[in-house]
């Protein structure tokens, strides 16, 4: 069995949801807990899911694209002059 990270880990899926793993809590703006059934969840970022905040796969139907694509290994910030 794959071990979960001690703290929440967010994986940015190209053209898809945000996968959240580890120990975390999802709450409403008022601080009320949002029920979840799984330890790893996919959060919608296309805005078209019928079960927000969770992804229901609709991003594939609407051909959601993250453009420009999120860098897999972003370059370090420029420290400036
Ligand atoms: S990201 Fe999957 S339905 Fe929105």
Image (tube, grey):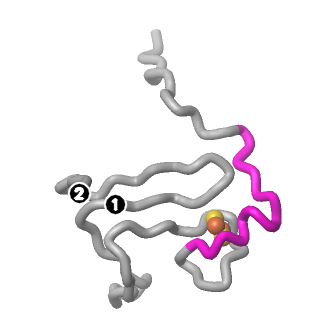
| Marking on residue 21 | 1
In this rendering, the answer to whether 32 lies above or below 71 is below
Discs 1/2, front: 2
Q: Nearer the viewer, residue 18 or 37?
A: 37
| Residue shown at 76% from the left, 58% from the top | 64
Dominant SS in magenta: loop
| Residue shown at 72% from the left, 71% from the top | 58
| Marking on residue 1 | 2
Look at the numbered disc 1 and give the secondary structure of its residue.
strand
Quadrant assignment, res 63: bottom right
The magenta segment is: 55-68
Residue 13: give x, y in percent of width and height.
Answer: 56, 50
Q: Residues within 10 Å of mark 2 (few under 14, many from 20)?
A: few
Q: On the rendered image, what quadrant is the N terminus found in?
A: bottom left
Q: CA distance from mark 1 to mark 2?
A: 14 Å
In this rendering, the answer to whether 35 lies above or below 12 is below
Look at the numbered disc 2 and give the secondary structure of its residue.
loop
Residue 75: give x, y in percent of width and height.
Answer: 49, 22
| Residue shown at 66% from the left, 70% from the top | 57
Outermost residue on the left side: it is: 6
């Amino acid at each position: 069995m794959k071990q979960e990270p001690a703290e929440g880990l967010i994986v940015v899926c190209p053209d898809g949801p945000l996968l959240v793993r580890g120990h975390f809590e999802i709450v409403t703006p008022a601080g009320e807990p949002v029920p979840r059934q799984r330890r790893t969840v996919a959060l919608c970022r296309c805005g078209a899911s019928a079960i927000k905040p969770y992804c229901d796969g609709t991003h594939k139907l609407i051909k959601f694209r993250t453009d420009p694509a999120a860098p897999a290994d972003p370059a370090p910030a420029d420290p400036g002059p």
